[in-house]
Amino acid sequence: MTNSTQTKLYPEIIEFIEECLTREHPESYLISILHKLQERHGYLTREHMYEVAQRLQVPASVVSGVSTFYHFFRLKPRGRYAISICLGTACFVKGADKILEAFRKKLGINMGETTKDGLFSLENTRCLGVCGLAPVVTINDKIYSRVTPQQVPDLLSRALAD
Amino acid sequence: MPKVLEKFQQIKQEILKEHLPHYDSGKIIIQVGSATCENAAGADQVRAEFRKLLAASGRDDIVIKQTGCTGRCSREPIVGVYFPGQFPFKYEQVTLPKVQEIFQQHVLAGKPVLPLILDKKTSNLYSRVVTLCSMAAPRYAEQDHWADILEQRLKAKGIPEGTVRIFTGCSLGLYSQEQSSTNMGMIVFPQKTVYTFSTEAELDAIIQSHFIEDKILKANLAAMDPLIKRFISLYGDVAFFNKQTRLTLRNSGIIDPEDLGDYIANDGFEALAQTLEHNDPSRVIDAINRSGLRGRGGGGYPTGRKWQDAIASTDPIRYVICNADEGDPGAYMDRSTLEGDPFSIIDGMIIGAFAVGARQGFLYIRAEYPLAIRRVETAIAKCRAAGLLGKNILDSGFDFDLDVRLGAGAFVCGEETALMLSIEGKRGQPRLRPPYPTQSGLWGHPTVINNVETWSNVSVIIRHGAEWFSRLGTEKSKGTKVFALAGKVRNSGLVEVPMGTTLKEIIFDIGGGVPEGRTLKAVQTGGPSGGCIPAGLIDTPADYDSLAQAGSIMGSGGMIVLDDQDCMVATAKFFLEFTQDESCGKCVPCREGTLRMLEILERITQGHGQMEDLDKLERLGRLIQKTSLCGLGQTAPNPVLSALKNFREEFIIHIQEKRCPSHKCAQLIRYEIDANKCTGCTLCARRCPVSCISGTPRQPHVIDQERCIKCGECFMVCKFEAVHKK
């Protein structure tokens, strides 16, 4: 168990937890805390989760239960460029499977994996609500619309050049 | 003046003092779309470019504004240019070079750039635009009939062709005259004059006076609802919008969603001020009941009854929640409202909270919508600062505050009991109902959960009256519904129509039909909980009961158009993969049952299906429907069962002939090389990952079907179109 004197959590996260403890139903902020932590660190580590549990005064099993239940939380690091392929209905109908296939071939990794050099990871997302411009791919925060399999190499090199 | 209204007027005046110029302020306004979809299409850069050009021009009578999404996704980014007292112009698919052109020619020199205009339907400048509309329910056939007469009469009166443009479509239902449901309406631009008439003689009189003598015919003037008038005056010259009636989307694409002044200037929070002034919760619930508003999240439960259920409890602590966990893949109505008009949701929630006696509310928004989250948080902060949220709202003594909670990528959290657990910070696993949330909800207290679109309708109903609202729609489905039209349709985007508008009108008249000369095969509504309606039932009216009768559901409003190249087996499998993946695992029928169904569908799409699989699918599907714990499981088999009912033949071809007629199921495609077209270039043989293509250079090649893994590489690389899919 992590001792609170040997803190590993980021100060701003600790501060947020402290603030939550002063509000009504502090434990209801667990998901918000994990969101902030993931945004700061990129993914959730076991040590971080233990410390969140301790500071929020909830069992570690609750924290681990929540972080594994929700797809949005990552338990391992993603690549520097996170490629998210929308597999919502509109994108599916417009050929998102072919885009996914093109990325898989080009990068040599499957959905949910990261390239060995740590540069790219492939993720799927369920509908970004940009259905009118399907199929849609996001690389980190940038959205690319009406993507074709032929554009895939270009998207990768543009990401690297950014 | 009464206390609350006085306070509201004071706040309103203060906010409007600082408010940016609006359409009729005498300034030239350049309005650039700003929503997730607009930005994906490049609106961010377009706005930056306009700012740069504006700064360089040194003009201070030009203002750049942002707005949400008008729903014209396939035409974005959209830019509007508004000169005081003139036709508004909308440009589509604006790129950086087009920004230059629009700014130099139109904004600075006053000459609209005609070829870039939205929908490109016009090549000349009309001096007048006429929009014909019916009153209560849409009566398109009648409108078309009157349009023909109008055209003939204008011609007979010697008005040159090409100077008056006639639209048909809108069903306003909103004129104040009671007798108006038998009349036709007619809006003439640019003056935005609204006439009503019922006979040809009356029409003649209007033409004589307005078009020939240039005088307004007072006898036939109609009072038009300001809400609709504003939308029509900005978008009345675009066919896409003319068969729509915008209530939920009344401000989307019109106001700046981050500007409280814009919302207030457009009637915002008036309904709230009235409500708090009357200080009578039962009056609100009564109005919502009489309006016939039903939940827009999919279930269609009467909103007023839900609120009544909540006040039946003696528990003094109550909550209201906005379900903005729009997880249905292919639906984005709520994102658009959250991003385009967040104040309207807050407005409705405060009114609802007052009606049911809640002091705290939550907006549960999915984490995949970062811009929506930001906009809602901004809106809440601005309302708090203005005294519209927090303690003693508008000096009425009523306290209420709102908090945003984020989802984390779990579709099941759209189910209300799971959603509440998620707000409590727990795993979102649904529980049995009853007790319903209105009896025992968040932390065990009575809780009212409504979705974004429902909340957004509340202030409109209170402001304009239950009777006004209930004139729109059908007997059992009142008001309008927003649909997210996507897939194989020309004008993909958001469409808001009166309930009861037929699928055909939505897809063909507004959506522009199926592109690339393909034919319509089916319409999928309701997402993973809904079903496919075959092309033969295209005349089905879009309302709760008719869609259910056609074997699907209204759902939250996703509408995916499928053409003859889409495989119904693969589509059914797609939805089941989704629900299987999103099943929370709590109950066995959903967790195990959907998995078994998916395995059977996988077998069929890989060519290993048996005929008895079809019966198994049906039996299993019905079992899952009956025995699952929550709505996710109970509706998960719907896409498969409806496909089996309407497209059984296609399943049989997959099983018996081991063939996919639409060439979607990879394992059932057969690649063959056309010996007449093959030049023997050897490219396919070199690229084939399993080396199953043989032949000597410059001679036709052959694919060994036994070893082929159907990867399609040969098909993609062939430069001579010699590889055929069969």
Image (cartoon, coloured by chain):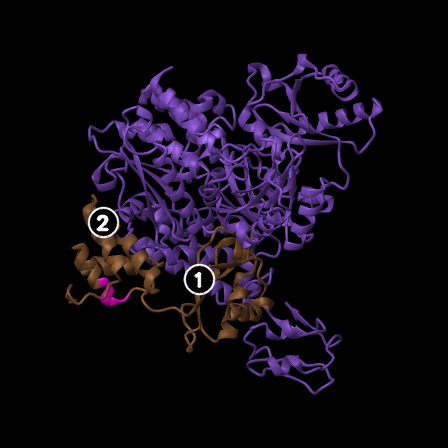
Classify B170 as above or below B617.
Answer: above
Chain identifier of the brown chain: A
Q: Amino acid at mark 2?
A: Cys
Helix, strand or loop for disc 1: strand
Q: Chain of mark 2?
A: A
Q: Quadrant of the N terminus of chain B?
A: top left
Distance Cα–Cα, label 1 vs label 2 = 32 Å
Q: Please tell me whether the stretch drawn in magenta is mainly helix, strand or loop.
A: helix
Q: Foreground mark, 1 or 2? A: 2
Identify the residue at image location x=34%, y=31%: B387
Residue range of the region highlighted in magenta in the rendering: A45-49
Residue A125 position, x and y percent, is 44, 59
Q: Secondary structure at mark 2?
A: helix
Image chain in purple? B
Q: Which residue is mark 1?
A: A124
The answer to whether residue A77 of the structure is visible from this angle is: yes
Residue B654 coordinates in the image, percent (x, y): 54, 62
Mark linked to residue B242? none
Residue B243 vs B202, above or below: the answer is below
A1 displayed left or right of B348 = left
- Up-down: is B221 above or below B255? above
Image quadrant containing the C terminus of chain B: bottom right
Kindly identify which numbered label has been placed on residue A20.
2
Q: Quadrant of residue B105?
A: top right
